[in-house]
Amino acid sequence: MFLVVDKRKLLIGIGIVLLVCIFGATAVALYCAVPRKEYVVVIDAGHGGGDAGVVGSKSGVSEAEINLLVAFTLKKQLEERGVRVVMTREKKSVLEDGIGSKSDDFEKRKSIINDNSPDLVISIHQNKFPDSTRRGAQVFYNVSSEQGKSLATAVQTSLNNLNQEKVGRSFSALKGDYYILNCSPYPSCIVECGFLSNPNDEELLLNAEYRENLSALIVKGTFAYLDEKSL
Ligand SMILES: [Zn+2]
């Protein structure tokens, strides 16, 4: 049997396909040519100086130390994604030569955040609880910041991959009344990466590969928030 093809219709069809391809390619080229906004993220490694934070029950490692290790890993991974990262501290203390009071420390963090007008702030901490079986990653936000809540929810959702694996359940982001969440108008969250009062969490947090995995999930959540916001 012969297939009867209407040449005119065929030509119109080919023309339409070609036009769609040309416009599609042009749209993609234009999209790629528009420079993407450079995101700025402040990473705040909690504690430091004379404030060690909580202490590991097994190894005696300080929270301040673990916070800085996680912060550096997160910084590296965000920079690999083209983000400009500002750290509140890269040394033991936020303050020059570690000299100053706790309120000086807080003021310094606040001015670093506000001077850089970041897209968002991520503060890294470790948790502690009297019941040593308690473990997992928990994210906090300022209740009066809708954007902060969206950021915290996106990061918590991503970190729930680890919580499901290690704890067998997911957590919800929680509201919290903390200085670092309240000291600027920028979307902020606190990530309590794990419990230093839990020996399993402590061992994992001391492991560089685990910190890489943990940071990768924070990055994933951060971009889920930024992508959603830029729609
Ligand atoms: Zn802390």
Image: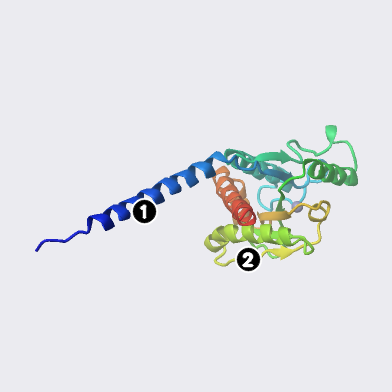
- 131 relative to 34, above or below: below
Label whose residue precedes the other's in the sequence (2 or 1)? 1
**Disc on res. 225:** none
Q: Quadrant of the N terminus?
A: bottom left
From the image, state whether disc 2 or disc 1 is nearer to you: 1
CA neighbours of label 2 inside 10 A, class few (<14), some (14 to 19), many (20+): some
Q: Which mark is residue 171?
A: 2
The amino acid at mark 2 is Phe
- Asked if residue 182 lies left or right of residue 34, the reply is right
Element at label 1: helix
> Which x, y percent locates residue 167?
57, 64
- As helix, strand or loop, the secondary structure at mark 2 comes to loop
x, y percent for residue 121: 72, 49
Specify the farthest residue to the top: 97
Front position in the image: 100 or 215 = 215
Whether residue 138 is visible to the viewer of this picture, yes or no, is: yes
Residue matched to label 1: 16
Q: Residues within 10 Å of mark 1 (few under 14, many from 20)?
A: few
Looking at the rendered structure, the kind of residue marked 1 is Ile
